[in-house]
Image (cartoon, rainbow, N blue to C red):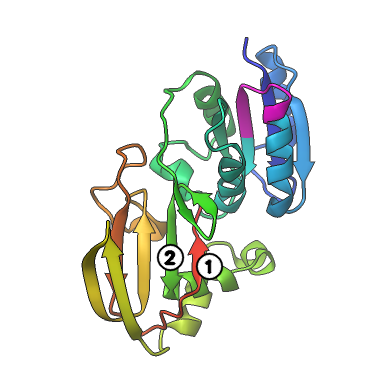
Amino acid sequence: MKRVAVVAHTRKSLGGGLDELRHLLAHEGLRPAWYEVDKSKQAPKRARRAAREGAELLIVWGGDGMVQRCLDAVAGLPVEVAIMPAGTANLLATNLGIPRDLPAAVDIGLRGERRKLDLGTVNGEHFAVMAGAGFDALMIRDADRKLKDRVGKAAYVWTGARHIRADRVRTRVEVDEVPWFDGPASCVLIGNVGTIMGGLTPFPEASPDDGVLRSGSSRRRARCSGRASSGG
């Protein structure tokens, strides 16, 4: 039986909460190492500790930010990661077919298909969903925890609307040292999955395990400021 560890964001909820997760794992005969955090930035230290102490399966309870931080912490290590989609958007879980149903998510985590995920890097951190500069980065930055706790996914609509009329900037993009785009743009996205919020598919051919990251740019009137944000 695999050695299991749980890293859980206590402010995130799914099903019957962490008590139900404990019960489901106990029913499977598991007594995992257990780490709780109240901010996702505290998660990498716990994830690395779990891996260092021999965890073979890391169960991550939280949203895309929590998952991104844990994946960044254990990237390249011999640790499997199971996602409990307890966040606001849960984009990686959605693209991997993990439902917002706790018993089903646990079953997938323990017995589901294993896949090696592609990870990109931005500003020294790994990401599995997407990274963006400009409009996307500003939208993600301003949708802080308090706003998401108050209005849920509508937080991204609110923060997006705040920046939609900002000026475009001259943007140059090279892919594998080959010019790909040169012109005014509001946003540059690098995607590892196809579907984002609202069921939109800006990268319809993207797959999280095909060894390729997809690029995209937008000519909407928003500012591409050079700030970069990892979307998970």
State the SS at label 1: helix
Name the residue furthest front.
Answer: 177
Q: Could you say where residue 49 lies in the image, as x and y percent from the top left?
A: 74, 33
Q: In the image, which residues are magenta? A: 51-59
Q: Are marks 2 and 1 in contact (CB under 8 Å)?
A: yes
| Residue at 61 percent of width and 21 percent of height | 56
Q: What amino acid does circle 1 point to? A: Ile
Image quarter hosting the N terminus = top right
Mark yes or no: residue 214 visible.
Answer: yes
In the rendered structure, the answer to whether residue 230 lies left or right of residue 58 reads: left
For label 2, the residue is: 132
State the SS at label 2: strand
Q: Could you say where residue 55 lies in the image, as x and y percent from the top left?
A: 67, 23
Q: Could you say where residue 62 lies in the image, as x and y percent from the top left?
A: 63, 45
Q: Nearer the viewer, residue 99 or 51?
A: 51
User: Does the magenta run of residues contain 96?
Assistant: no
Q: Could you say where residue 3 lies in the image, as x and y percent from the top left?
A: 67, 17
Specify the label residue 140 is tagged with: 1
Q: Nearer the viewer, residue 6 or 98?
A: 6
**How far apart are labels 2 and 1 at the CA level?**
9 Å
In the rendered structure, the answer to whether residue 156 lies left or right of residue 21 reads: left
